[in-house]
Image (spheres, grey):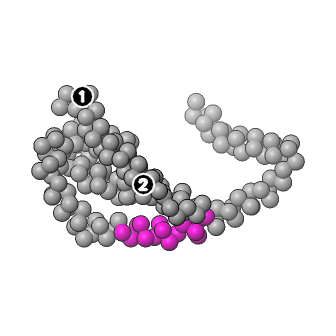
């Protein structure tokens, strides 16, 4: 099985080349054109990404994330939501790498088989880095008015957060 997997990518590339040549497509020219378009997309979304990364870093470094988590913890405690996952729920729609670092901290501090560890793990798979995704995809095609995208995506993230707690409660009887 491992031997087959090591040949998968070269076989796919070879099939693409054969198909392109059979259809009389200038494969190398198409490849170079795609690279050029990719570079242009990268340059066009760079300011948005730099702003997003800077704001996430400031949010974490300033302690605002901890202050907000502490402020809503009485409400979340009433719902049975572990306090350890609140910063993750707040940061997940904004930053993928930041939320992975928080997940790592949660799993290191309370363990992978703890209620908070399980909720955090499910939450990571049930939610999306909404603002990063909107920045990249909408910025790449030049859409400035997101209309209903961000509110809808945030509602989905909030649903994923609460349902991750509920699913872990139901599956593990906590």
Q: Residue 70, located in which quarter of the rendered image?
A: bottom left
Is residue 54 in view?
A: yes
Please tell me whether mark 1 sits on a helix, a strand or a loop. helix
Residue at the spot 12% in from the left edge and 43% down from the top edge: 78
- Which marked residue is nearer to the observer: mark 1 or mark 2? 2
Residue 137 image position (x, y, % from top left): 54, 57
Is 14 drawn above or below residue 171 in the view shown? below
Let me know if residue 53 is in the magenta part: yes
**Outermost residue, front direction?**
147
Relative to 125, is 137 on the left or the right? right
In terms of secondary structure, what is the magenta stretch mainly?
A: helix
Residue 170: which numbered mark, if any? 1
> Is 59 left, or right, of 95 in this rendering?
left
Q: Label 2, on which residue?
A: 150
Answer few, some or many: residues within 10 Å of disc 2's Cα (few below 14, many 20 plus, some between 14 and 19).
few
x and y percent of residue 35 in the render?
Answer: 69, 61
Q: Which residues are magenta?
A: 41-55
Q: Nearer the viewer, residue 97 or 77?
A: 77
- Residue 16 % position (x, y): 75, 44
Q: In the figure, 17 relative to 98: above or below?
A: above
Q: Earlier in the sequence, mark 1 or mark 2?
A: 2
The residue positioned 84% from the left and 54% from the top of the image is 26
Q: What is the count of numbered marks? A: 2
Quadrant where the N terminus is found in the figure: top right
Check if mark 1's residue and mark 2's residue have beta carbons within 8 Å. no
Q: CA distance from mark 1 to mark 2?
A: 30 Å
Say if the magenta span includes residue 45.
Answer: yes
């Amino acid at each position: 099985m491992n031997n087959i997997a090591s040949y998968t990518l070269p076989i796919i590339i070879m099939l693409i080349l054969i198909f392109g040549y059979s259809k009389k497509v200038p494969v190398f020219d198409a490849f170079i054109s795609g690279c050029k378009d990719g570079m242009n997309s990268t340059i066009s979304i760079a300011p948005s990404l730099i702003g997003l990364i800077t704001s996430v870093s400031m949010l974490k470094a300033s302690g605002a994330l901890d202050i907000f988590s502490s402020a809503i913890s009485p409400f979340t405690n009433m719902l049975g939501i572990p306090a350890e996952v609140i910063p993750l729920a707040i940061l997940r729609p904004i930053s993928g790498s930041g939320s992975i670092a928080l997940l790592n901290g949660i799993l290191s501090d309370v363990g992978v088989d703890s209620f908070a560890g399980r909720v955090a793990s499910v939450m990571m798979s049930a939610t999306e880095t909404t603002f990063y995704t909107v920045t990249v995809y909408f910025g790449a095609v030049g859409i400035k008015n997101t209309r209903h995208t961000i509110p809808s995506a945030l509602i989905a993230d909030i649903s994923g957060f609460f349902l991750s707690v509920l699913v872990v409660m139901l599956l593990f009887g906590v």
